[in-house]
Image (spheres, helix red, strand yellow):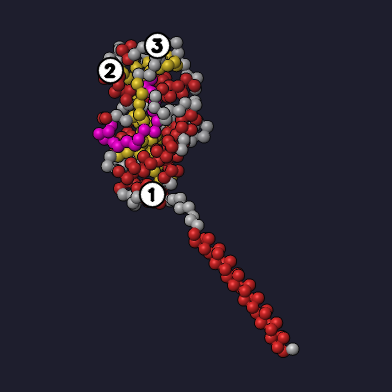
Amino acid sequence: MRKGKTYILAAVLLVAIVAFAGVLVACGGDDATTTESSSPTPQATSAADIAQQILGKAPSGLAAEIVNRGSVLVSTDANYAPQSSVNKETGDLEGFDIDTALAMGEALGLDIEFKKVQWETVIPGLQTGKWDVSIGSMTITPEREETVDFTEPYYYTSGQVFVKKGGPQITGVADLDGKSVGVGAATTYYDFLKSESTANVKTYPTDADAFPDLRNGNLDFVMTAGPTGQQAILEGQPFDFSGAPLYYEDLAFAINQGEGDWLQMLNYAVGMMHEDGTLTELSKKWYNGLDLTVKE
């Protein structure tokens, strides 16, 4: 009897050992699966990580200051609907450029702080560090390229003449000779009219400020971006397009010269917003279904 009990005990122990070995093998199999599978690379979540991924190094210069601060100072002319204006009900800034700036901040992991400024002060403010970038529908011109650096264009628009409702339709810039034309100060419209016509050009702090004089008969025409005049018409102001656009413009973000890392980060954001359709969506939202991110 004692010997039989010994056999039974041995058999039980053997079963237990085999079972335990099976557990070890199973655990070892799970570990092997985890080791062999590759997890996706975590997406950068901080501004510093995003900058590192874009640049392949830690940012320097103004880019480093912005990343360390965690926010971007963006200049905007808040009297330039539908690009940038103040909502009369909420008091908040709104418009295509406002939404574009916010989308840029999201792409780079940065907060956005807007600075409401007069248009003529935008470039001097960039040069003296009062703000980090202009996202304000600035046209790329050779003259401006001497003082600021531009990103790749984020959209395109027309140089368009507007007239009081029922007024004359121009066939070209020559029809503006001797006429009074209102434009925003320090704009491409001013430069174009002074070089291509003998119009009596009157300047205003911003393009939209010329519209009351057009409505009251103190101006013959106003020249501005096509979407700006169109917005005024949609708001019920008594204006018409006068003739076809006189030209088209490439519009871009502008920064102070010599800030290569910051320019590369912004170009990354612009490229990403073109690629993923963000800019197209925003253009259609603010420009009545038109996609101005595609050049005519």
Which amino acid type corresponds to the residue marked 3 in the rendered image? Gln
Q: Quadrant of the N terminus?
A: bottom right
Q: Which residue is mark 1?
A: 53
Question: At 35% from the left edge and 35% from the top edge, which residue is drawn?
Answer: 152
Q: Which residue is mark 2?
A: 196
Residue 225 in view here? no
Answer with mark 1 or mark 3, whichever residue precedes in sequence: 1
Answer with mark 2 or mark 1, whichever residue precedes in sequence: 1
**On screen, 34 above or below 159?**
below
In front: 95, or 60?
60
Element carrying mark 2? helix
- The picture quadrant where one finds residue 270 is top left
**On screen, 114 above or below 19?**
above
Question: At 41% from the left edge and 22% from the top edge, which residue is drawn?
Answer: 226
Element carrying mark 3? loop
Residue bounds of the magenta highlight: 144-160
Residue 51 image point, x, y percent: 38, 48
Q: Which residue is mark 3?
A: 169
Tell me if mark 3 has few (under 14), some (14-19) or many (20+) residues whose alpha carbon lies within 10 angstroms of its own.
some
Q: CA distance from mark 2 to mark 3?
A: 18 Å
**On screen, 263 above or below 171?**
below
Which amino acid type corresponds to the residue marked 2 in the rendered image? Glu
Q: Quadrant of the C terminus?
A: top left
User: In the displayed structure, does residue 146 sit left or right of residue 241?
Assistant: left
Residue 3 image point, x, y percent: 70, 88
